[in-house]
Each structure stands twice: as structure tokens, then as C-alpha cells.
Image: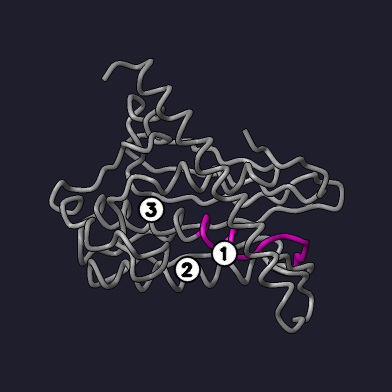
Amino acid sequence: MDFEEMQNMHDFLDNFYMSRIGIRMLIGQYLSLRQPPMNDYIGMICSETSPAKIVQQAVDDATFMCTRKYGDAPSVVVHGASNLNFSYVPTHIHYIMLELIKNSMRATVEWHGIDEDYPPIKVIISDGEENEDVVIKVSDEGGGIKRSHMKRVWSYLFTTADPAVQEGMVAFENVDHSIDSPLAGLGYGLPISRAYARFWGGDLSVMSMEGYGTDVFLHLSRLGDSREPLP
């Protein structure tokens, strides 16, 4: 398959999953509004969303998944705006952060070797009263990504997991993104995480230093004035 055909397919999948996120959001919002009201929630939207609490939940889930596969997991240190609250959909942040943290854990374990002392993964939550975005940075020392692979990290067809792992993906075809899903091998994690971020006017970007580690920046729009980016 040549580059143009792959690009057309990726554009189609981007539009497909963006539409799917929108449909799931509409259905989820409708069903949530028909349930008894919850404090600080309007449907699926929480007016007091705490990125720090969601990050900690994602750390706990990723640690469980990494320990299940490797027997151990790197520690995660969270810095920054621990008292920050803003209006957002908590499940969307959790989806993205779980993907980023488990990717960093896997890279760190495989780069340094099992049963070694792992350098901690660092998560920084940045916010200011004048900022248009809440920015979360995830940094690891997991060896980084080859420069030739950087464009491919957003491909739905690209994964660094072993072929043996991918062969077992059929067993998880009905499992949503949860601690029951495999640590890696699906190949959809980063592009769909970026779609979730862009759905609300944010973005996701990756910077890597091969031989050292990777920094991922998650931008979450806090202004509430972004249009739904449906195709």
C-alpha cells in the first residue's frame, strides 16, 4: 500500500472515530441526564474535574496492567497544579492519560530491563488563570522513539508490540479501553487519544530523544468555546 492510499485510509479513520466519539458523547449525555443528578455533574460533564485525581486513577490502572505483564512497574511522580478544577469530561481525560502512562511504563521497563531500578515517570500539570489550555506533560526515560518512526506513531496500523502479542488481540475484540485490555499491541491508542483531545479543541503532541526518552504534551481546552470538529 503506497503513502497516498495509507493517507486516505488514515483520514477516513480519523473522521470515523471523531464521529464515533461525537455519537457516544450525545448518547452518553442523554442517558446521564435521565439519571438522578450527581453533584458537580451535568450529564457526563463535570464542572469540578480534577486532572490530578484523574491522573492518579490512570497511574493506578496503568501500574496494575504493567505489573500484570512484567511483574513490576516504574513509579510515577506527579507535579504541578494539584488543586486545579475545571469543566470537562473526566472519562476522556482518563482514557488519554491511561494510554500515555502505560506507554511510558512499557517503554521504561523494556528499555532498562526487567528487575532493574527504573527511573520514575514524571507527570506535570500546568495551569494559570490566563492560560487558554490545561497542559499535562508526561516524561519518561524509556529510550525514546526513532526519528523515522515519529510520523508513524499517529498511524492506526503502527505498533511496536511483538507479533505474538498482536496475534492474541482477537481475544480482546469486545473489551473496551480498561484494565482488562492488553498493555500494548492494538495500535490505536495514540491516534484515538489525539482524537479525544481534539474533540474539545485540544491536542496531543509527541517529542522524543532517541536513546533517552519521550515527552508527550496533552493540551485540554478550558475556554469552552470550541466547535465540535465533526467531518
- The part of the image, by quadrant, that contains residue 202 is top right
Give the residues drawn in magenta, as a range: 84-97
Q: Which residue is mark 1?
A: 78
- Residue 30 place in picture, x, y as percent: 70, 66
- Check the picture and name the quadrant holding the C terminus: top right
Relative height, residue 155 to residue 4 (above, below): below
Question: What residue type is disc 1 on?
Answer: Val
Q: Which circle marks residue 103 in the picture?
A: 3
x and y, in percent, of residue 46 in the image = 74, 68
- Compared to residue 36, the image places residue 103 above or below, namely above
Tell me the crowding category of disc 3: few under 14, some 14 to 19, or many 20 or more residues within 10 angstroms, Cα based: some
Q: Nearer the viewer, mark 3 or mark 1?
A: 3
Q: Is residue 59 above or below residue 200?
A: below
Task: Please say if the residues under marks 1 and 2 sit with CB atoms less than 8 Å apart.
Answer: yes
Q: Nearer the viewer, mark 1 or mark 2?
A: 2
Of pointers 3 and 2, the one earlier in the residue sequence:
2
Please tell me which residue is depicted at 43% across the width and 30% down the height of the picture. Answer: 10
Residue type at tag 3:
Asn
- What percent of the width, then of the height, locates residue 199? 64, 45
For the residues labelled 3 and 1, the Cα–Cα distance comes to 16 Å
Q: Secondary structure at mark 1?
A: strand
Residue appearing at x 45%, y 36% in the figure: 13
Residue 12 is situated, as x and y percent measured from the top left of the image, at 47, 31
CA separation, marks 3 and 2? Answer: 11 Å
Of callouts 1 and 2, the N-terminal one: 2
| In magenta stretch: residue 134 | no
Q: Please indicate whether residue 40 sits to the left or right of residue 196 in the image.
A: right
Mark 1–mark 2 Cα distance, whole angstroms, equals: 10 Å
- Look at mark 2 in the image and give the residue it sits on: 59
